[in-house]
Amino acid sequence: MIESTPFVGRLRFPLAALLASGLFLSAGCGTEADRDGTVTTSRVITTNPDAVEVSKEAREEHAKSGYAFGPISVTRATEAEEARSGEEYTYTLTVANNSDAMLHNVKVIEAVTGGFDLRSGMIGESKDNMVRPANMQELSPEIQAALQPQPQAQTEARTEGGTDQAAAQAPTPFMIPIGMLGPNSQVTVKLTGLPTSGESFDTCTYVDYTPSICSTVAIARPEWVFGVMVTDAEGNPIRTAYVCDPIYLRYFAMNTGDAATKPITVTQTLPQGFTTEDGESEISLEGDAIEPGGDNADPVYIGDLMLIKATGPGTFYATASATDGSINRADDTDRVTLVKPELNVTIDGPAQVSLAGGAKPNYTVRVTNVSDNAIARDTVVALNLPEGTGRDFRITDTREVSYEDGRFQVGTIDPGESRAFRFEFTPIRGGDLAMTASASAYCADAVTQELTTNVLASPSFQFEVVDSADPVVVGQNVVYTIEAYNEGNAASNLNVTAELPEGLEFVSGEGTTNVTGSGRTLTIEPIANMAPDKQTPAQWTVTAKATSEGKKSFRVVFTSDGLDKPYEDEEPTNVDPALNNE
């Protein structure tokens, strides 16, 4: 028995020996052995579909009865007692893998010397002819060397007178490719040929294969999960916040596997309306590798808290992705609803009051939280009254507010609710009194409303109209002086209207307010507010030209918010005919 991996060698099988034994055994020709080989493996990958698994006992018996080449043994058998010239001759080879390793690229090379034409070779139950002439270049160097004619055999043949020509000829190799041969399995090869000439022929079997070396590699599995949270400045998760609150993003991962991750990279694109503190919408963070923690793994935070700014209320969905530099990727989403209070303020009061009788108008200020989901915190209402417009200011209803230095501390107002308060004062002068109420709250835009009350004054007027000369001559000018004194309370909207009689024509006018005229009609600009002042009257002068003789009367009408009815005054002027100097 010759062990070789791959099997390399020759053995002559004379026909007489075959007939005597009835069993063909494949072996190395001659007695020399070639190289030993060993194959180790830890895994079976696949098997030849024609291979049949055999028992340990059968493998041992097979190895005893055949020839083993390393992990392979080959047994040759035939049912024919002799080979007849001109008739097909069939024999089988049983190729067995006696190892626990998968053998690849198994090839049987059948070398024929002498008068035998090998025509077919079928593997297992297949009907396909797999035998073909072998190309020397596809054979291993060892087999090529073994197929060369042996000098000793050639010498013996010549010595014997050339009667054994087979020994002196170069063998013809045929290839039967088996492919893969699984561990502890075997396959049969049925070979058929036709004896052609001579007294005997030789067949030698060579086996070549590629061993497989397999190993088991443990798979490390970092089982990690990724998360993103919306938090406050302390890192506490939040679900609702005011739009002006600082909100933060926190990223974390947990490794529940049995191997460390690669460094974690986090990326996120912020939705429209949200930016980082630097005004960016893209976030990218580089984290460290995360050691395994098993079922009790703690979260490992990636980067610091990331400050996020919002431009308005709404629900913010924070979707981030993480990767460990391999095919592993994880996504997570958190959300927060950002709210913003919306206020409305109104101020209600009389549109007009009179100074007569010391009236005290009453006003109501109401502030309402008109938002749907935001509580108005720290609500304040500021009341603004022009200085010097009133006295005896008093809050008449403080059940829902507190007042200090012109500011009403309203406090918290739930969505849809209102707070109201009332106040009064005594106006001290006439005219339009404008006041404003402004409301503000945490994270809410300030709102303001204005109310104007017209205060009717109760003045005590003295009016006077005088001319500068009487009589005047036709063609001369006459000057009228109009004066108005307020000796009572403040007055508002003092209007003076005048009209020249026929025979007088407007020349010019001036005074406390502008005076204009066209023909006989005069326009004097009103006085909005006229404070009590006995020493400084409102005064206007009107210059007119006499155009015709006769008794003329200049009529002036005074009106004011503080007068119950218009006041009229007339100044008569005599116009004489023009003097005749001839």
Image (cartoon, rainbow, N blue to C red):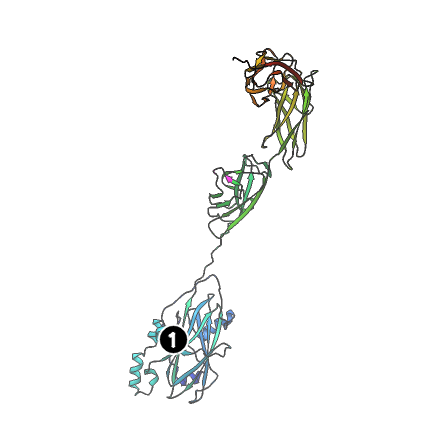
Name which residue type carries label 1. Answer: Gly
In magenta, the rendered stretch is: 275-280
**Looking at the image, can residue 497 be seen?**
no
Relative to 116, is 312 above or below?
above
Identify residue for label 1: 28
- Find residue 337 and report its horizontal and vertical position in percent: 60, 40
Would you say residue 276 sits in the magenta stretch? yes
Q: Is residue 272 left or right of residue 380?
A: left
Looking at the rendered structure, the number of numbered marks drawn on it comes to: 1
Relative to 570, is 267 above or below?
below
| Nearest to the observer: residue 66 or residue 53 | 53
**Looking at the image, can residue 454 be seen?**
yes
| Nearest to the observer: residue 144 or residue 273 | 273
| Residue beneath the point at 31% across and 87% down | 162
- Find residue 532 and report its horizontal and vertical position in percent: 62, 13
Kindly indicate the quadrant of the structure image that contains residue 527: top right
